[in-house]
Image (cartoon, coloured by chain):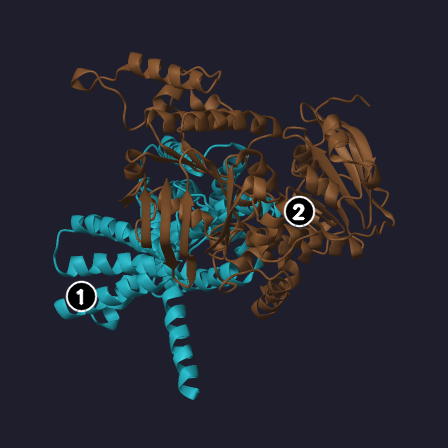
């Protein structure tokens, strides 16, 4: 009798393990760490992991915002452009000699405004977010070039280095991460994001304030992009008009590799976090192996296809 | 002749077909009925080549067949017209008919003349007034279905399987489909006709086979049976009563609609809904009932007029406001406007009630589970566990999920828009029962349905809508199907 019960528990455990949505991505991360640790001396070291975490913070923060957008069935191609806009246009304040306590909120405010524009357009015009944000991306990037005339902002006062130094970026990332995990799993707002992605009209008729919440996710995505930009400035010590290039596609890659459905409705913040880690691991591993970094793109591409295939197999099994 | 011998098919945990043996005679219209999950769609999928692994044997005219794909089945003379039409809206009627087997001239150039000639011939055989060069997307659903039938004819099909062909047709269009089926029959084509609607089965079929729980319960000649017998074979119990016995429980006025209008949709509609009342809205498709319901629910705007709740004027700009004022709406479009298909049963039920489930800021998962379990037990929702994806449930169970969600909101007014569409007899009865229970609790129900028997069977009053206008109100005791239908089709001016 007892045995039967235990068996039951075992199979239930097996089943629930299979149902852990992040399972594939956890496995990839584990496999990558094991493989690189054997192949590369010095890979399995605190120093290296510290490096990797430091590298993934900015793209990680952007990916977290992107996850919320994608969960609702949307997409935001303009995150890299918003990042750049916030620091370049906000950076004009530095040139004008504004104090940091005005420049920082100003940068975040720019992220807010550009995110708001994305949200406003996607909820008012019956055109997919892909097209809207493709448009706004070009507008934002174009505006940067018009205003900065392509000039770098340098030097930056050393006070701005603080946010990019030591553990600060990772602490910021960790705070946003934990906050978002709780929001998506345990709050009405978070649950409703999944509902919107699962069926927009159905959610509307279930009393979900669809338009409002969609506005919110684009705004959050915008603010987080600006925040990532501020960290980037702190790390590099200068501001370049081309900042944040490819952040959009890399963030989407991290989200998708992390198991979030591109159609919305399923996925997780934790998955995205692991997706970002995986991409960081690969980049670090390839760099340490002295393999041409161009390989990274190739491997990321395979990973996306692989992750999506696994996801569709799991969908079928359900 | 199609002979099915000892066919079984299993899915993990379910025996979808259990040792089925039956015969379909050449040239007959053979009806296939059964509740959802009875196995009829599994059988169709085997016959049409979608499922190729099953136990047992299938013979067509004494030679054994094993289709490997839908294409393979079509090549062997079995064509299926699925519920979800497979026509391509962007292509023309003729192109659709020849899709995948276009006649060619040399060097792979399409032979448009031949396509046009054959398609015209096929269309005229069916007496269909459709231009072969028009884009299919511009046709009505009924005409798209005719294109599908033409496709089957072009293939020289000997057997045509029709899966719920009338489910998205209007009464009028259904009347047009039947002569067409007779035409096919005259040509010697065998038809396997799958439907939920017993009346239809009796009208068009020669022979009726009943399925229940994966088993073939029996096959009856139409002339030797009646609908009561067929229904009791389907549900395994006698259903003398298709509707629960209802006693009127009319109390206070709850909802009062005054002269609401919306351009091109409905005009000057006024009615009162009382607590404990089921107000049936009868009408043909396009009579403006759904549009009116959505406007009351705040999903679309009203041009003029007023909605009063407990004699207070209300104006809802968003369904959220309607819900928080105690008006809930169940859409006719279960998949598109009711369910979050890739979310779990649990999430689908709790979505409208997260505020209640949340303690301060955080959702109380334990409480959520309890309350979702309460409703799923109450309505006997068939599922493996509450975290199952809702898409994998049967139609009736999906509908119960949405009803659970709405009931949890503790609304005072429920608008049920075609709540029994596409679900089986047993589940229909359960939904009528739920509606009856709600009225006993003093809720008011607006019940929109295009199936006249159920509107007459369960409503206290019947509102007849025609072309956006409310043209007549019957009390339950003064209505009968003939009278109501005459009004609905415009045969009787007020």
Instruction: Determine which of the numbered discs, if any, sits on residue A36 in the image.
Output: 1
The answer to whether residue A77 is visible is: yes
Frontmost residue, A19 versus B105: B105
**In this rendering, is residue B277 above or below B200?**
below
Between the C-alphas of marks 1 and 2, the distance is: 52 Å
Foreground of the two, A265 or B5: B5
Query: What is the chain letter for disc 1?
Result: A
In the image, residue A9 above or below residue B398: below
Structural crowding at the residue carrying mark 1, measured as other residues with C-alpha within 10 Å and reported as few (<14), some (14–19) or many (≥20): many
The circle on residue B133 is none
Tell how many labels: 2
Q: Residue at x 22, y 48 (%)?
A: A297
Q: Secondary structure at mark 2?
A: helix
Q: Which residue is mark 2?
A: B320
Q: Position of residue A213 (x, y in %)?
A: 56, 47
Q: Colour of chain B?
A: brown
Residue A36 in the image: above or below residue A200: below
SS at mark 1 in the image: helix
Residue A64 versus residue A17 in the image, above or below:
above
């Amino acid at each position: 009798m007892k045995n039967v019960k235990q068996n039951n528990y075992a199979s239930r455990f097996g089943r629930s393990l299979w149902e852990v949505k992040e399972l594939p991505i956890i496995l990839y991360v584990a496999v990558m760490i094991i493989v690189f640790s054997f192949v590369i001396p010095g890979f399995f070291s605190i120093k290296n992991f510290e490096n990797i975490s430091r590298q993934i913070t900015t793209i990680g923060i952007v990916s977290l915002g992107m996850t919320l957008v994608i969960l609702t069935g949307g997409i935001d191609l303009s995150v890299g452009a918003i990042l750049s806009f916030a620091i370049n246009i906000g950076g004009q304040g530095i040139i004008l000699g504004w104090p940091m306590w005005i420049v920082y909120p100003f940068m975040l405010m720019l992220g807010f405004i550009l995110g708001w524009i994305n949200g406003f357009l996607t909820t008012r015009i019956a055109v997919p977010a892909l097209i809207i944000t493709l448009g706004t991306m070009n507008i934002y990037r174009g505006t940067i070039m018009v205003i900065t005339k392509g000039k770098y902002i340098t030097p930056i006062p050393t006070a701005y280095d603080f946010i990019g130094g030591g553990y600060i970026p990772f602490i910021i990332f960790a705070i946003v991460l934990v906050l978002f995990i709780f929001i998506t799993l345990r709050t009405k707002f978070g649950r409703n994001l999944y509902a919107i992605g699962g069926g927009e009209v159905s959610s509307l008729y279930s009393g979900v304030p669809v338009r409002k919440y969609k506005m919110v996710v684009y705004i959050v995505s915008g603010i987080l992009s600006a925040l990532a930009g501020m960290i980037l400035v702190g790390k590099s010590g200068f501001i370049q008009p081309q900042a944040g290039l490819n952040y959009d596609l890399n963030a989407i890659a991290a989200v998708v590799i992390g198991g979030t459905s591109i159609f919305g409705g399923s996925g997780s913040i934790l998955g995205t976090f692991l997706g970002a880690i995986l991409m960081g691991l690969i980049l670090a591993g390839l760099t340490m192996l002295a393999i041409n970094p161009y390989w990274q793109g190739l491997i990321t591409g395979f990973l996306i296809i692989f992750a999506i295939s696994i996801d569709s197999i799991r969908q079928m099994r359900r | 002749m199609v002979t099915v011998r000892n066919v079984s098919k299993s899915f993990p945990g379910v025996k979808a077909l259990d040792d089925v043996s039956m015969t379909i005679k050449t040239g007959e219209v053979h009806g296939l009925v059964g509740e959802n999950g009875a196995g009829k769609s599994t059988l169709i999928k085997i016959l049409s080549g979608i499922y190729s692994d099953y136990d047992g044997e299938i013979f067509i005219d004494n030679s054994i067949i094993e289709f490997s794909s839908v294409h393979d089945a079509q090549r062997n003379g079995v064509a299926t017209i699925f519920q979800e039409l497979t026509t391509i809206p962007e292509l023309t009627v003729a192109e659709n008919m020849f899709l995948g087997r276009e006649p060619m001239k040399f060097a792979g150039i399409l032979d448009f003349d031949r396509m046009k000639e054959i398609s015209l011939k096929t269309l005229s055989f069916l007496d269909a007034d459709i231009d072969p060069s028009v884009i299919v997307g511009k046709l009505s659903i009924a005409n798209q279905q005719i294109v599908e039938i033409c496709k089957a004819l072009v293939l020289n099909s000997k057997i045509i399987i029709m899966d719920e062909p009338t489910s998205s047709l209007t009464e009028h269009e259904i009347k047009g489909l039947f002569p067409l089926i007779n035409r096919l029959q005259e040509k010697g084509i065998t038809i396997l006709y799958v439907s939920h609607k017993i009346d239809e089965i009796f009208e068009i079929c020669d022979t009726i086979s009943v399925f229940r729980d994966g088993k073939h319960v029996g096959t009856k000649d139409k002339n030797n049976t009646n609908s009561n017998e067929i229904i009791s074979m389907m549900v395994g119990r006698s259903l003398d009563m298709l509707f629960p016995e209802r006693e009127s429980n009319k109390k206070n006025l709850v909802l009062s609609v005054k002269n609401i209008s919306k351009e091109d949709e409905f005009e000057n509609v006024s009615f009162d809904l009382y607590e404990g009342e089921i107000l049936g809205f009868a009408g043909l498709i396009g009579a403006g009932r759904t549009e009116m319901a959505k406007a009351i629910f705040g999903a679309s705007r009203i041009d003029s007029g007023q909605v009063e709740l407990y004699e207070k004027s209300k104006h809802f700009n968003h369904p959220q406001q309607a819900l928080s004022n105690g008006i809930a709406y169940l859409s006719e479009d279960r998949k598109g406007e009711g369910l979050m298909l890739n979310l779990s049963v649990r999430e689908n039920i709790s979505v409208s009630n997260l505020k209640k489930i949340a303690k301060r800021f955080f959702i109380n998962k334990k409480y959520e589970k309890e309350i979702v379990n309460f409703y799923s037990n109450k309505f006997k929702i068939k599922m493996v566990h509450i975290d199952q994806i809702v898409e994998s449930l049967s139609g009736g169970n999906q509908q119960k999920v949405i009803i659970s969600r709405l009931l949890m909101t503790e609304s005072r007014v429920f608008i049920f828009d075609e709540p029994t569409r596409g679900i089986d007899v047993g589940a229909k009865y359960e939904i009528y029962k739920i509606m009856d229970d709600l009225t006993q609790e003093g809720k008011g129900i607006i019940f929109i349905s295009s199936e006249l028997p159920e509107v007459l069977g369960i409503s206290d009053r019947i509102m007849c809508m025609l072309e956006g206008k409310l043209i007549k109100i019957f009390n339950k005791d003064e209505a009968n199907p003939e009278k109501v239908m005459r009004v609905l089709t415009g045969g009787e001016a007020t």
